[in-house]
Image (cartoon, coloured by chain):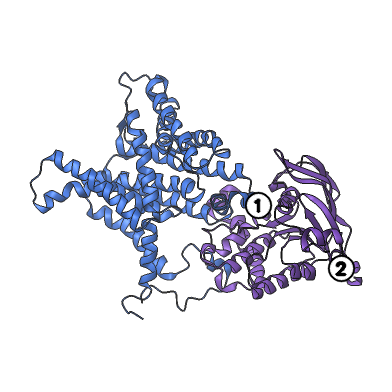
C-alpha cells in the first residue's frame, strides 16, 4: 500500500536508470541518512559508538569491497584480512615516512597499496577458478602475516612489533571522540557506497557480472577476462585496503599483525555470504549481522536474568552463532539482501491482502 | 536465385584448408568454404561432425592446427575471441550462454560493451560520458528489445525465463554488438514449431534489415532449406557438400551420409 510504484511513470531512460527509481526508496534512503548523520549522534553513547557503530561501518566498507570481487565478479577470495593489513601498514608507513601528509591521503595511499597487491595476487585468477583460487588467495594471507611480523621495517622497528598511533587529525581537526570517529567512518562509507553502486550499474559492473555468470560468452562479446578480473581485484582491494586503514587508525588505535589474521578474512567472507552475494546493501546487512550477533548473544543471559559463568556464555555464543549462520543459509541461501527484497515486494500490498 | 544475386556482396569470410585436432581426435580435416556478404549460410551434418568446432575456429575460441581464415580480406591464423568481437563477429551458443544473474536489459547492454568508452573515474561518479553513454546505448538496446518483441520481460532476470525466450534474448545480445557476421549455433534447438517460426522470422529480418551475414548450424532440415542461401555439409570433420538447398537435396553423398542412405 505504502510501497508501490503505481502511477510513477518513467518518461526518460535517465529516470528509469536512476539508482532509486521508486519515490518511496528515495524517501527511505533519505530517512536512513538522517538517522545516521543526525539522530544517532544525538542519542548514542560512547560505548555504543565504540563497540557497535564504528566497527559495523568499517566492516560494511570491507564487505562491500569483497562483495564486488566475490559477489559481482565471482572470484572467491580469502585474502581480505591481508588486504586490510596492507592498507593499514601502508597507511602507517606513509604517515611516518612523509611528514605532514594528510591522514586521509594516507588512507587512500594505503588503499592504493592494497590495490597493487590485489592486482598482483589476482593474476592467478586468470588461470584458476573457484576453490583453487580461494587457496591461492589464502597464500597471500600467510604471506602478509609473515611480512608484517618478521620484517621490522614495516613496523618502524618497534620492539614489540605492535603499532600505536595518535588520533587522526585533519587540518587541525582531531578525530579523537567516538562521535567524530563515527562521523568520519560514516562519511567514508557513504562515499564508497555511492562509488560501488555506480560501478556495478555501469559497463564495468556488467563486465564483472558477465565474467561471473558465463566467462566464455563474456569473452566472445569482447570482454577481456584479464581486464574484468584484475579490475575487480583492484577495486575490491582498494575498498578493503581503505577499510583496513580505518580499522587500524580509527577503530583499534594500536594493533599488531594478529589483528589482521585469517579469522578476519573469514568474518568478511561470512558477511558477504550472509548479507547476500552480489548486493551492495547485502554487504552492510551482513556486516551488521556478523558484528552485532555475538554482542547480542553475549548480553542475552544478562537481560533474561539467567545466571551463567562467562565461560559458559562465550561457549554458547559460539554455538548459537554457528547454528544461526547455518539456519540462515539453509532458509535463505541468497542472504539478508534477498530477505530485504522479498519484504519490499510484500510491502507493496501490505496491509491490505489484495 | 535472382533475388540472391542482387543481395550478395563480395566474400566476407573464407576458410582455407582448416584442420583441427584434439589430441588424436580429428575434429576438422581440410575444410574450405567461403561466405559472401549478406549471405545466410547453413552448416549441417550429423552429431559430432565438427559444426560447432568450425564456428569456434571462426571466432577464435579454437586455433586451427593448419589452414587459415580470411576475414574482411585479412588472413589470420590465431585470434582471441575478444579480437573477433572487435572485428564484428558475434555468436550465440548451442546451450544457452546467457548471464543468468542479470536482467534481460543488462544482458543485452553487455552486448554493447565494446561500443562504450567512458573512463574509470567517470564510471565511479556516474557523471559525464559514463551517464550519457548509458542512456544513449539504452536507446539502441530498446530498439533491439522492440525488434525481438521482448518488451514485457526487459527487467526480468534471464534465469527465470522459459527456454524459447532465453534463446531470443541471446540473439538480442549478439545483435547488440551490431555484428557484420553473426554465428548462430542451433538457434532453434528444443523449440516448438511456433517458436521455430518466430525465430526463423527474426533471423530473416536481421539478414534483411541490418544486412548481417549469418552462418548458422541447425538440425531441422525444413528450417535449413527455407532459410539459407547456401548449405555446407560436414561429416566426420570433412566437407562432403556445398551448394544451394536444391543442389544439396540432390547430392547423393549428402543423402547417404545425412538424410538417409539411398538404395
Residue drawn at the location 57% of the way across and 64% of the way down: B104
The numbered disc on residue B246 is 2
Q: Nearer the viewer, mark 1 or mark 2?
A: 2
Identify the residue at horizontal 63%, vertical 62% (top origin).
Answer: B170
Is A115 placed above or below A280 here?
above
Q: Where residue A277 sits: x, y (%)?
A: 43, 52
**Which residue is most to the bottom?**
A354
Q: Quadrant of the C terminus of chain A?
A: bottom left
Tell me the blue chain. A
Q: Which residue is mark 1?
A: B117
Q: Quick one: label 2, few (<14), some, or many (20+) residues within 10 Å?
A: few
Give the chain ID for the purple colour. B
- B160 to the left or right of B67: left
**Please, what secondary structure does the residue beneath circle 1 have?**
loop
Q: Residue at x 56, y 54 (%)?
A: A206
Of A131 and B230, which appears nearest the observer?
B230
Q: What residue appears at the point 71 percent right and 38 percent down from the top-left corner?
A: B24
Q: Position of residue A178 (x, y in %)?
A: 27, 44
Labels 1 and 2: the sequence-earlier one: 1
The crowding category of the residue bearing disc 1, from other C-alpha atoms within 10 Å (few below 14, some 14 to 19, many at least 20), is: few
- Image location of residue A3, percent across then percent down: 38, 72
Asked whether the residues under marks 1 and 2 belong to the same chain, the reply is: yes
User: Can you see residue B104?
Assistant: yes
The N terminus of chain A lies in quadrant: bottom left
- A114 versus B175 height, above or below: above
Amino acid at each position: 500500500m505504502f510501497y508501490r510504484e503505481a502511477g510513477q511513470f518513467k518518461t526518460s531512460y535517465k529516470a528509469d536508470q536512476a539508482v532509486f527509481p521508486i519515490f518511496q526508496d528515495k524517501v527511505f534512503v533519505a530517512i536512513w541518512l538522517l538517522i545516521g548523520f543526525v539522530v544517532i549522534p544525538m542519542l548514542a553513547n560512547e560505548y555504543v559508538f565504540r563497540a557497535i557503530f564504528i566497527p559495523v561501518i568499517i566492516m560494511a566498507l570491507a564487505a562491500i569491497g569483497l562483495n564486488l570481487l566475490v559477489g559481482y565478479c565471482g572470484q572467491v577470495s580469502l585474502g581480505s584480512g591481508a588486504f586490510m593489513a596492507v592498507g593499514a601498514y601502508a597507511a602507517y608507513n606513509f604517515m611516518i615516512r612523509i611528514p605532514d601528509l594528510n591522514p586521509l591521503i594516507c588512507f587512500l595511499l594505503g588503499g592504493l597499496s592494497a590495490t597493487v597487491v590485489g592486482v598482483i595476487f589476482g593474476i592467478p585468477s586468470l588461470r584458476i577458478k573457484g576453490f583453487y583460487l580461494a587457496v591461492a588467495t589464502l597464500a597471500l594471507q600467510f604471506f602478509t602475516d609473515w611480512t608484517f611480523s618478521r620484517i621490522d621495517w614495516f613496523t618502524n622497528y618497534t620492539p614489540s612489533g605492535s603499532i600505536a598511533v595518535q588520533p587522526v587529525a585533519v587540518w587541525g581537526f582531531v578525530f579523537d571522540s567516538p562521535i567524530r570517529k563515527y562521523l568520519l567512518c560514516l562519511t567514508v562509507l557513504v562515499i564508497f557506497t555511492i562509488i560501488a553502486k555506480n560501478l556495478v550499474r555501469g559497463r564495468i559492473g556488467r563486465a564483472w557480472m558477465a565474467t561471473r555468470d558465463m566467462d566464455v560468452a563474456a569473452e566472445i562479446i569482447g570482454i577481456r577476462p584479464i581486464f574484468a578480473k584484475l579490475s575487480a581485484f583492484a577495486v575490491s582491494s582498494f575498498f578493503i585496503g581503505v577499510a583496513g586503514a580505518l580499522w587500524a587508525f580509527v577503530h583499534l588505535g594500536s594493533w599488531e599483525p594478529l589483528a589482521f589474521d585469517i579469522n578476519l578474512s573469514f568474518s568478511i567472507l561470512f558477511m558477504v555470504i550472509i548479507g547476500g552475494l552480489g548486493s551492495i546493501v547485502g554487504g552492510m546487512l551482513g556486516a551488521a549481522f556478523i558484528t552485532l550477533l555475538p554482542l547480542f548473544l553475549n548480553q542475552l543471559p544478562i537481560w533474561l536474568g539467567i545466571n551463567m559463568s562467562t565461560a559458559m556464555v562465550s561457549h554458547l555464543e559460539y554455538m548459537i552463532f554457528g547454528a544461526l549462520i547455518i539456519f540462515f543459509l539453509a532458509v535463505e541461501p541468497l542472504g539478508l539482501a534477498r530477505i530485504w527484497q522479498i519484504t519490499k515486494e510484500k510491502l507493496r500490498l501490505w496491509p491490505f491482502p489484495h | 536465385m535472382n533475388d540472391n544475386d542482387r543481395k550478395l556482396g563480395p566474400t566476407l569470410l573464407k576458410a582455407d584448408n582448416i584442420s583441427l585436432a584434439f589430441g588424436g581426435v580429428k575434429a576438422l580435416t581440410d575444410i574450405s568454404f567461403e561466405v559472401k556478404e549478406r549471405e545466410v549460410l547453413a552448416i549441417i551434418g550429423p552429431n559430432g561432425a565438427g559444426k560447432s568446432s568450425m564456428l569456434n575456429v571462426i571466432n577464435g575460441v579454437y586455433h586451427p592446427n593448419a589452414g587459415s581464415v580470411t576475414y574482411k580480406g585479412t588472413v589470420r591464423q590465431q585470434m582471441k575471441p575478444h579480437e573477433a568481437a572487435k572485428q564484428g563477429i558475434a555468436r550465440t551458443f548451442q546451450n544457452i550462454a546467457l548471464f543468468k544473474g542479470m536482467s534481460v536489459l543488462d544482458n543485452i547492454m553487455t552486448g554493447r560493451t565494446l561500443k562504450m568508452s567512458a573512463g574509470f573515474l567517470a564510471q565511479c561518479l556516474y557523471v559525464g560520458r559514463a551517464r550519457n553513454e548509458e542512456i544513449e546505448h539504452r536507446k539502441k538496446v530498446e530498439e533491439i528489445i522492440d525488434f525481438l518483441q521482448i518488451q514485457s520481460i526487459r527487467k526480468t532476470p534471464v534465469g527465470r525465463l522459459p527456454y524459447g525466450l532465453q534463446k531470443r534474448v541471446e540473439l538480442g545480445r549478439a545483435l547488440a554488438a551490431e555484428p557484420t557476421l553473426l554465428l548462430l549455433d542451433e538457434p532453434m534447438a528444443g523449440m516448438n514449431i511456433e517458436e521455430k517460426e518466430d525465430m526463423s522470422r527474426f533471423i530473416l529480418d536481421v539478414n534483411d534489415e541490418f544486412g548481417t551475414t549469418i552462418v548458422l548450424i541447425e538440425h531441422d532440415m525444413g528450417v535449413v532449406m527455407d532459410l539459407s542461401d547456401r548449405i555446407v555439409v560436414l561429416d566426420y570433420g570433412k566437407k562432403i557438400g556445398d551448394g544451394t538447398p536444391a543442389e544439396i537435396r540432390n547430392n547423393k553423398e549428402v543423402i547417404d551420409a545425412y538424410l538417409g542412405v539411398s538404395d
